[in-house]
Image: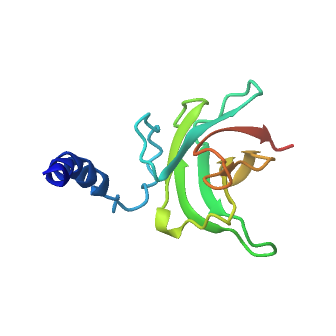
Amino acid sequence: MKTLHSLVFSLPILLASCTASPSSTAPPAAATGEPATAAAAPDSVTGTITYRNRMALPPTAVVRVVLQDVSLQDVAATVLDSVTIRPNGRQVPFAFALRYDPALIKMSNTYTVQARITDGGRLLYLNDEAYPVITGNHPKQVELVLRPVQ
């Protein structure tokens, strides 16, 4: 009787621990440039892009943000996702969200976010420091501060 009593009280706990939340099968985010939301998926990197000088962007400027695997030296980085933002006269900060497939993430690899702002093919701003994300106790949310190209 004592065993049956223990089993009756333990069963709901055991069943609750066996349930798993469904994994996302959604494809990577489209390059819409829509602002990131506070309720971002756990398999995404979010953040903002800004720069410190007080220069307005031309209305035709384009912002490109890339999530990439930079683990291998002397090899081009592998792009996991990218987004293109067309500000159309809006100014910084710009929010972004980059999706990735958690099954493709290797904990021993290094992942970074890179951003650049161009206008008519001319580079205006870029990040001049690495922004590591996801692995190695790095965050999934970053604030990229871009520098003007001289």
Colour mapping: rainbow
Which of the 4 image quadrants contains residue 146? top right
The location of residue 75, given as percent across then percent down, is 75, 75
Residue at point 74% right, 50% down? 123
Q: Nearer the viewer, residue 13 or 115?
A: 13
Q: Nearer the viewer, residue 83 or 23?
A: 23
Q: Nearer the viewer, residue 35 or 108?
A: 108
Residue at point 43% right, 42% down? 40
The location of residue 29, given as percent across then percent down, is 43, 55
Q: Is residue 33 left or right of residue 115?
A: left
Q: Residue furthest right?
A: 150
Q: Nearer the viewer, residue 53 or 79?
A: 79
The location of residue 100, given as percent across then percent down, is 49, 59
Q: Is residue 89 left or right of residue 16?
A: right
Q: Is residue 127 left or right of residue 111?
A: right
The location of residue 97, given as percent across then percent down, is 50, 46
Which of the 4 image quadrants contains residue 143? top right
Q: Is residue 93 above or below residue 142?
A: above
Q: Examine the rendering and report whether any part of residue 21 can be seen.
A: no
Residue at point 60% right, 57% down? 67
Q: Residue furthest top?
A: 54
Residue at point 27% right, 55% down? 19
Q: Examine the rendering and report whether any part of residue 54 can be seen.
A: yes
Q: Residue furthest bottom?
A: 75
